[in-house]
Image (cartoon, coloured by chain):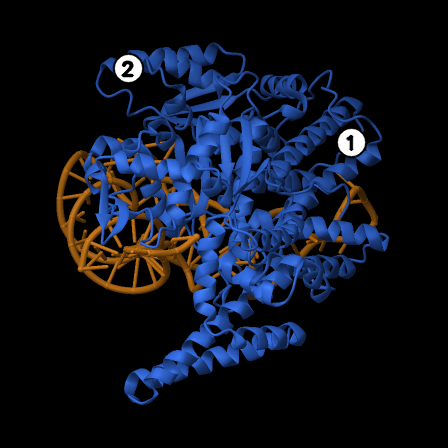
Chain colours: A blue, B orange
Amino acid sequence: MDLLVGVLSRRLGVVDRWELERLVAEPPRHVGADLAFPLMRFTRGKAGRDVVEGILGELRESPLVVRAELVGGFLNVWLEPREYSRRVFKALSTMGERYGAPSSLGRRLRVVVEHTSANPVHPIHVGTARNTSLGDTLARMLSFYGHEVNRRFYVDDVGAQTAYLAYGLHKLGGPSEWRRLSQGWKPDHWIGLVYALTYQLVELAGLKKRIEEARDEGGEEYRELVSQQDRLVSSLARLRERHPEVFDRLTKAIMEDPDPQARVYEWIRLYERGEEPVRGIVRSAVEMALEGMRQTLDRMGAVFDAWDFESDLVWGGLVAEILARARQSPYYTLHKEAEALDLGRLAEDPEVRRRLRIPGALEIPPLILRRSDGSTLYTTRDIAYSVKKYQETHADLIVNVVGKEQTLPQAQVRLALYALGYREVAERMLHYSYEMVNLPGRRMSSRRGEIVTVDEVLDSLCEGALGEMQARGMDYPQDMREEIAEKIAVGALRYFLVSVDADKPLTLDMGEVLDFNRNTAPYIQYSYARASGILRRAGQAPLEPPSHEPAGTQGERWNLLKLIGQYPYRLGRAVAELRPEYLVDYLGRLANAFHKWYDTDPVLAEEDPGARAYKLALVGALRRVLGSAMRILGVEPLERM
RNA sequence: GGCCCCGUAGCCCAGCCAGGAUAGGGCGCCGGCCUCCUAAGCCGGUGGCCGGGGGUUCAAAUCCCCCCGGGGCCGCCA
């Protein structure tokens, strides 16, 4: 690959290696070559003939090439397996565990990856799990590649949701009483229940009032309100079953409150101003939720360098600073009496759109910064947060893993930053968007308390893995079986969630994920376990580069070797384009090539000592590459399964 | 209504940005392979107007235009 790109670059006068590298392809099977390159676009006209001859001549001189020819505009190259093998093993031995990463990075980038940032009022659900899987995988990819990565979780504790939660919790007593009531519950699950109950009860109280008022008039509106009430009541009835004591106490307390809705709105403002006791109550509530969420994130293998509280941006004055700047800005405007930025004009500049990656013809409505009651909006605080992320890290790239549905607000944040003079920040921000995760036949709603949590999904996957092990008669001790099942479950979920283009909606069919159907984490883990088994039985240190390569580096063995040699390029592309699914695709191919070879060419039964040593080294190389790519994807390599 | 994303076998997906060889995988279905390194594996078979139409090009799944279908966004929510 390096050779080919080098020769092409010289002969074609193309300086951008990346441009050439991306075009190097796998030739169709009927050709039988090892590498292919579409030359036709570079060699139009007669002048091309000399260039082609030059390329072919130079390639043929290399010890790495046995054959090179031009067919139908394609440059096809056949590699010399022994020489190729020598080079791959050399790279493996010099790079060691870092094989796959570049030996010298052009420039080590500082990258912020903000991900997950789930609302601290309920457990993490499967949609968020996609965010976590993508974000953590991107971070691992970049970090393995040699970049400096800073992983951040944005705690969205300002606004209506935490106010509802805190208001409800307050009605139940203080933190010690919360602990008592949540005995036997995972903290975030209990929090999620209290949040859903509080939200619906407050809603119900408001509804009752409106029904009272509309009673005399009757008619369509009245009937609509009553049917809304019926839906709420039946939803509440389902929630009561989960925890009758909490339900009864909350219902009593909230219904006694003359105007719960107004109380909650008041709490939003009080918290934003940082006033006690609301401040303390909200913080304790959020801490409790985070405690539970952290357990789940640990389970998924996602760790963070920083937990940034939204409220700190408000209390610390950064939000006020943004507002002050906005008032000085030519884009400042009043939108129906609320302070706003009119970014439409700025967004018309094609140069700005390009630099800030504003999609297509996306129209930019005015961005409200502050409600008429003086409280700020999420997006306003997000502008401040972006500034903070940059000020603390001076990152070259700030990746925000945020759902697709926030495309507009994300674009508004970048434009606002640009308009307010934070141009560097704006240009370095990347909205890494991903589509929703659907569940067949279920609509999730955290307000109704109807969500499918990551914990449930992992438990269920764990059970499935245990069942499979049982069916296969694995006689490992119980605790070992459970440990393996857990690693399979986490791997299966993470692998699945990053396996398809983030732009595509994903349907998480529990049956399908449990099926472990093909290019799945367990398939890869199984390959790793197989390779480990061979090396274990061989009882020797793997990856000693063989003193000589035996003849017969061909067929399945050759395919496997070629794939192992491709790891640096595959990983390089995945990192450059931030596409973890490339790695998933690669792992699937690699594991498949190994299984094919495994089935046709025994390692341990090989009688020729040189050949045996070589095969063992190949297994060792495979195992290292598998392990490396798996760890990047957050899939635990398993010695046995 | 405006805008964004998606549409490739019965089902799921890669390829599209940066056009090139006979459009690749997987699941499912049918049929094979365990006296031998883990059968969560391997082999064979089955299945495609690449949503539809037009255009650009020597060449279109890929680029442009129109249309259809699915999802999302357009809030003093997040």
Q: Which residue lies at the image location 49% right of the left edge and 21% below the top edge? A: A1
Q: Nearer the viewer, residue A382 or A159?
A: A159
Sequence-wise, the earlier of marks 1 and 2 is 2
Q: CA distance from mark 1 to mark 2?
A: 48 Å
Judge the density around disc 1: few (<14), some (14-19), many (≥20) Cα neighbours within 10 Å.
few
Please indicate whether residue A534 sits to the left or right of residue A504 in the image.
Answer: right
Q: Residue furthest toward the front?
A: A276
Q: Nearer the viewer, residue A102 or A545?
A: A102
Q: Nearer the viewer, residue A304 or A361?
A: A304
Q: Position of residue A566 (x, y in %)?
A: 54, 28
Q: Which residue lies at the image location 23% right of the left edge and 47% below the top edge? A: A334
Is any part of residue A519 visible from this angle?
Answer: no
Q: Which residue lies at the image location 47% right of the left edge and 9% below the top edge? A: A61
- Identify residue type, mark 1: Glu
Is any part of residue A202 visible from this angle?
Answer: yes
Q: Position of residue A160 (x, y in %)?
A: 45, 58
Q: Position of residue A315 (x, y in %)?
A: 48, 42
Residue at mark 2: A49
Please indicate whether residue A89 sits to the left or right of residue A639 in the image.
Answer: left
